[in-house]
Amino acid sequence: MSNKKHEHSSKHDWTSEYNHPDCTKYYQNVMDKMQLVERCEIVAKYSEKHLVPLFKQWSGDLDKPLQFLDLLCCYGNDTLAYINAYFQTDYAKTWASQETCFQISKPRQFPVETLGIDISAPALQFGKKVGIFDRTKVLDLNKLSETETQFLEEKCQSSNVLIINSLAYINEDQIRLIIDWFASGKEPGMIAIGFVYSYMGPELISRYKFHLLKKLKFFASVPMMNRYLQEAERMKFGHEFGTYSRAYYEVWYLTREK
Ligand SMILES: C[S@@+](CC[C@H](N)C(=O)[O-])C[C@H]1O[C@@H](n2cnc3c(N)ncnc32)[C@H](O)[C@@H]1O
């Protein structure tokens, strides 16, 4: 198995947006200006129509709230899309300013307990304070201690819904382990995994898809735009892939039942 970082990781550095005390800088510079918020609404609308009814049924059958794990969650924008059906107008109404960003404008759509994992302590503190995440854990997914590995393995196995985007930040072997741990869980479960073209190249995306199909049952895939590219990214990715203005996104949904 390859231990190399993926081939096309030279994306723009958003570290300061990921480490601000609240979500406003991330919202303004990434979600709004680069239009990443559009894909959150696509996710929210897909989730409302196709996932929430299933999640309600699972929760009813299990007679308990589902365990929801957002890996590389940042401030929780994807959790809000899946769980609170957040549309572009909802993020704009709440996440755009420091006066409103601590309010959540829509309730959770199904019984659920949430765990957010990220390397950014400020982002997690925000998500917990606002009530997006019930629990949080700061982890560097590329440098896990033995205890942290055991923690993550248990959380992947016991989660009913695992969402993971931003795969480009994490070693390929670690992503494969996360998929394997999730697949070995016993309860009903769905993974939502986001592939970004072009800063994940087609070879890496295909390797992940082959692996997922070996371990899990395909449920659906949804295409969307990710965000506009920065100037340096345009030069790099456009030259190689023909993509100069935008990055594209595809979420694959797979379930545990084979
Ligand atoms: C684009 S944000 C993701 C937000 C949201 N999930 C989405 O896709 O819109 C990327 C996140 O990855 C986190 N991250 C980067 N490297 C990481 C690492 N080695 N371990 C854990 N999280 C990491 C950053 O702190 C940041 O919050």
Image (tube, helix red, strand yellow):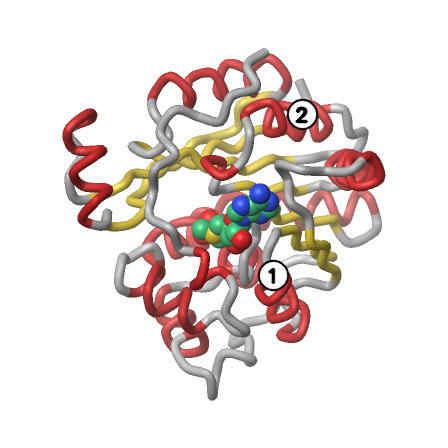
> What secondary structure is found at the residue carrying circle 1?
loop
Q: What element carries label 2?
A: helix
* Residue 119 versus residue 163 in the image, above or below: below
- Residue 176 versus residue 225: which sits nearer the camera? 176
Between 174 and 34, the one nearer to me in the picture: 174
Task: In the rendered structure, find residue 177 and report the number of the disc placed on it.
Answer: 2
Q: Position of residue 254 (x, y in %)?
A: 57, 29
- Nearer to us in this view, 160 or 7: 7
Q: Quadrant of the N terminus?
A: top right
Q: Residue at x 77, y 49 (%)?
A: 60
Whichever of labels 2 and 1 marks the residue nearer the N terminus, that label is 1
Q: Quadrant of residue 151?
A: top right
Does the beta carbon of the residue at mark 2 sit less than 8 Å from ligand 1? no
Neighbours of disc 2 within 10 Å: few (<14), some (14-19), many (20+): few
Rendered residue at 67%/50% (across/down): 56
Q: How far apart are marks 2 and 1 (CA)?
A: 30 Å
Direction from residue 61 to residue 81 in the image, left or right: left
Judge left or right: residue 116 versus residue 150.
left
Numbered-mark total: 2
**Which residue type does callout 1 highlight?**
Gln
* Residue 109's disc number: 1
